[in-house]
Amino acid sequence: MSIFLGYAATILVFFFTYNIFTLGLNIQFGYAGILNFTVITFMAMGAYFYAVFVMPRADTANQVYYILGLHWPWPLAMIAGVVASGAVGYLIGLIALKRLRSDYLAIVTLATGTLIYGLAGNQQHLFDGWAGLFNVNQPFQSVATNSPNEYSWILVLISGLLMLGVWWFANRLYSSPLGRSMRAIREDQEVVDAFGKNTFKIRMLAMVIGCVIVGLGGILTIQYIGALSPAGWTTGETFVVWAALLVGGRGNNLGSIVGSLLVAVVFNEATRYLPQVSSNPNLIPDLRNIIIGALVIGVLWFRPQGVLPERKPKFFEVPLTNTIATEDSDSRSIATGAGA
Amino acid sequence: MTLFLLTVGFGIVTASVLSLLSVGLSLQFGVTNYVNFAYGSYLGVGMMVAYTLSGTFHLPFVLSVVLATLITGLVAVLISEFILDPFARRRKSLFYMLIVTFGLSLVLDNILQIIYGVGFVEFPIAQSSPVQIGPFSFTKVQLIIVAVAIVAMVGIHLLLSKTRLGKAMRAMSDNADLARASGIDTRSVTRWTWFISGCLAGLGGIVLALNIVSFQTASGDAMLFVIFAAVILGGIGQTYGAMLGALVIGLVTETSVVYISSAYKQDVAFVVLILMLLVRPQGILAARGKA
Amino acid sequence: MAENMLEVDDIRLSFGGLKAIDGCSFEVERGTITALIGPNGAGKSTTVNTIAGAYRPQSGKIRFNGEDITNLPTYARAQKGLIRTYQISREFGGMSVLENLLVVRRGQSGERLINAVFRGRQSKRETEALVAEANEILNTFGIYKLRHEFASNLSGGQKRLLELSRAVMAQPKMMLLDEPMAGVTPALIERLGSHMVELNRSMGMTFVLVEHNLEIVEKICSQVVVMALGKKLAEGTMAELRSKPEVIEAYLGGGAHERVGG
């Protein structure tokens, strides 16, 4: 029974965190049309910075090295983590968002991701190199040591609440004038610019908000597992989030939930139990990546709007003061007559 | 000073490798107007096919290189025919094309990894001893790399300036709609462009592997943003700019070793890329309407 | 008391070796509808683009309401009330017609992150008022019934109407229209023209439009600037221009003389 419950808790935490990643990417790509090809780097930034703020000084006697080690209380360290991932997003935005073409941003995100990955791995003194950070302090750690079974549920609760918060935030943003401007930028940035909006600022906002949210997901991941090394955030992981967003439906927050359920939970969990091939231990993970990549391409071909397409927001009906409808016959004749 | 000159020599070799790679990427970008994020995987295809032909099937090395180059070109054409071009002809937004090529890179990389694993391999050729030329010191292989690059660049120049295909490619690069309207068979030009781009990626991948001696399937992808740096430096879509960008990036990354640890060689390319985007994003040789 | 709202002062712009604008100067009086006409390649669209801020002139000045805006970024010009439309309709296709209008109004409190998320009620009240206003505009332009349609689903003519109503929603002081009648049926040309006259009369909105259809120009424009080879060739009312030989000459060169004739 407790094995089953433990598994259920793991699945739930996993689902909630992937949901948070996907909602973050949805704000960047689904709302503002920002191609972030290194989503997972921000997850790692959130996680690593949370860890080095919450952990005590590195135990250099045992060859463990990392920066800071401030031993802050976990809620404060969480704030430090999201600020750090937001700041990295801001820096990337400064470089790439000034240009109109989306390829530049995609290139810069990818290049920065590669660079940070290399730095994190090769620089042992940053985040303990390829070994990564482990024994990361968890919230309510005393419970963890005394009754580990109940403890998982505390993390289910924390991640569930945070996911709800992000979900609420994302929906509020979507239908607000700010969210509307973001979506208009996705459609045609130049026109939004020509209507007097500072599109650089708005895109930057979407970029930073997305990175903060993905960073938050990263913090929850490292809180649950208690460890993270570069092997845990390869490019393949970025694709899982992209696939979840595109399968679910970009621009639709409910779609993000469905997508992360289908891709991150159902697909990932189902393939986890495939038998290992001893002669080729990488076969299953490689195949999984191939399928995820093919899924992204396939969805864009067969159902680019995703399982749940973006909906038109509902508006309260406001009666017209001038009720003479000038249109009916007119608009029909225009519809058939003109072609610009 | 001698150390500096020595690194200039390495810089010329790296620039030669990069020139093949960045021209291949830039040429294709100019014609199709989207960045191919799977380009790094094409390098992997080239080097691994050459490894199989020469190592496993024991074909003569030069023949293996030629075959692997052509095969990579063919792979690029097939991928364009069955995946990329259908997407492009649907006239969907640029977003889609970029995500599709990005997805493609994951698929190709992992296919290569299933076949070849993650280990490092080497071509079955003897390492030659360095030859002294003035202040520089090159191995025979490095001299051949430089020669191959020079021949290829002259070839590309003749292609673009003398042949009908080259002129059609330039016309599409300037304005695809206009090119189509003036009777250019854009589909056939696109196909040939992918073939040439694929061949350059394959050949570039092989000479890259020769230069770094031991390589793995991911070696091509590791090079991707250095290629981007060269391409953006020269002005994205500008073929001659890409050659110039390759020369600058090659020299800068290699000579940086004199001043900082060689572990950060590629990060120097990244810094150049960032500076370029901040100061002159349209590239040294600015392309009209493409920035 | 006539007063210049826009002053274009000897602007020059070349692409590569091609001189697109070669020392062009003209003024637009407040409250007028001014047309920019001329043969193809005269630099009309480029001039409009330069006034709106898509290009920076290599020399010369552009003043709007007496203020030098030559080096302002596009969005800052729009904030001063200079709003443009495009030669080819550029609607926000993935958003509803109504949202297309809502998005362009400047200075909504909900454009700030804090207000957007935490002051929902205030933002909602504001949006409600905007929806009412947008509905009125859509009704005037005859596309009210389509307000919940995705803009990409509209026909070419409807997109033209949307483009104009969206510009009106932005509360422009001056509207720059780049060939608003291009590819539009004669019936709709009449309607678009009368909408402009109405906006001009009732709200005092100033218009500058690039237009090839001289019939409608004659009907609605009080002032016409003729451009050729990147320069101003002549100006005046349509009737005055018809008698000027250099104008006829320029159009002969452009191969459109029959249109000047009537």
Image (cartoon, helix red, strand yellow):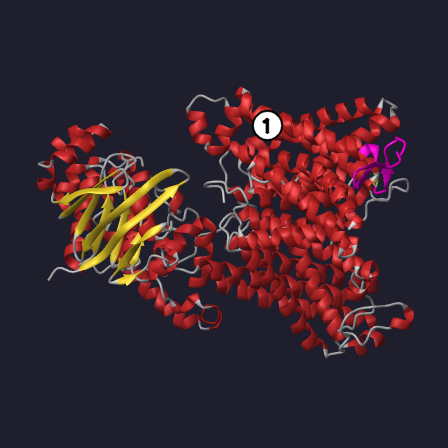
The x and y percentages for residue A194 are: 37, 54
Q: Secondary structure at mark 1?
A: helix
Answer whether residue B219 is magenta in the image. Answer: no
Q: Is residue B258 above or below residue B61?
A: below
Q: What residue would you read off at disc 1?
A: B157
Q: Which residues are magenta?
A: B118-141
Q: Residue at x 67, y 67 (%)?
A: A159
Q: Is residue C85 left or right of residue A178?
A: left
Where is the N terminus of chain A found, in terms of image quarters? Answer: bottom right
The x and y percentages for residue C108 are: 37, 66
Front-lying residue, A77 or B63: B63
Where is the C terminus of chain A found, in terms of image quarters? Answer: top left
Front-lying residue, B75 or B23: B23
Q: Quadrant of residue A26?
A: bottom right
Label 1 Cα crowd, 10 Å radius (few <14 / some 14-19 / many 20+) = some
Amino acid identity at mark 1 = His
